[in-house]
Amino acid sequence: MDEPSVGLDPVGVRTLGRLLVQQARQHQAAIIIVTHDLALAGGAADEILFLDPGSRSLTALGWKGPAEFDEYEVRQRRLAELESTVEDLLLRESPPRGSTDRRRIRFDLLAPFRVAGSGLSSAFQSHLFRQSAVVFRMAFQESFIRPAMFYATVGALLGFTVPYVIANISRDLRPAAVFELIKGTYILSLAPPLSAILFTATSGAAISAWLGGLQLHGQVTALEGLGVPAARYLWSPAWLALVVGYLATFLVFTSAMILGGWVLYDSENVKNAFSLLTADFVEPPPTRYPYLVRGFWSVLVYTFAAASIVVANGKEPKSKSEDVTAAMTSSVMRVTLFVVLMELVTVVLVRICEGPR
């Protein structure tokens, strides 16, 4: 039974407790009750198991026999002791305010790498597939299926707007000549970083909020208390869904940028517009190889970074709703800073590979 005493007054709770005990004894049946009502638990239970947030496990409270059938003073004393025991267990959950744990700071720095490692190792365990498929489907739907049209729209607008602005910087050059000069280089340069930041701010924030909500409302504690490892059955499929979701997002975003560029190029009567826009991807000249390698490397790194940072922030313990919002914001900030740093580093490396001109 799940919270059978919700909405009942104290007299109703005691009546329900007596009824449950009578029915269990009459039918020689066991009844499992999940409840926050300590009066019901103490009044009806032969044994009480407490889902301890601190140890994340079921803890036997040493309760023997329903208190409902004791004398009034004995019953009240037993229920007061039960309430005190549960209160002590709950108070152990939160560390003192202002305490600093250096190991926690170190764990925060390593958390994305651990999440990635756990995601990769668990993704190939066939016996986990059925249990994790539901989480993967939900996370993939939120990270790609629902926002796919949004990504396509933004990509098409950028694919049209960026070369349009470049072509109109100078009135001395014909737009068509500028388009033939820049070709599709702007797509190869902008698609990886912009798609990664956009994906994290949209899909990553949604998944981080979802995972944070599971932490905040105790579902993760309930899973682990029942012996279900959240790292395998929750974090790993969510991480894998973000990996697949970003790769799909990049393909949609890049294709939309090509489409937007083609509309602009074709409107200016640029010959072989589609070939110009896709040359860096399909048939790049030797001088463009470093840029192509940089693009693919960036996509690979951003895929793992975005998924790992989002899940690492989402899986951290949450004690209030503000923690969920902070985790969402932190995910976007960390991924954005990482993308900016990678862009700067890879640009320098490409220039080194090109050598002096």
Image (tube, rainbow, N blue to C red):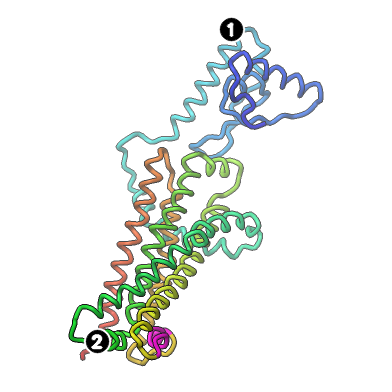
12 magenta-colored = no
Badge 2: residue crowd in 10 Å (few <14, some 14–19, many ≥20): few
Q: Residue at x 29, y 77 (%)?
A: 164
Q: Amino acid at mark 2?
A: Arg
Q: Main secondary structure of the magenta part?
A: helix
Quadrant in the picture for the N terminus: top right
Judged from the image, the secondary structure of the residue bearing numbered disc 2 is loop
Residue 58 percent across, percent down from the top left: 58, 36
Checking the image for residue 73, the label placed there is: 1
Q: Earlier in the sequence, mark 1 or mark 2?
A: 1
Start and end of the magenta stretch? 272-281
Q: Amino acid at mark 1?
A: Glu
Quadrant in the picture for the C terminus: bottom left
274 magenta-colored = yes
Q: Looking at the rendering, which quadrant does residue 70 occupy?
A: top right
Q: Residue at x 25, y 78 (%)?
A: 166
Judged from the image, the secondary structure of the residue bearing numbered disc 1 is helix
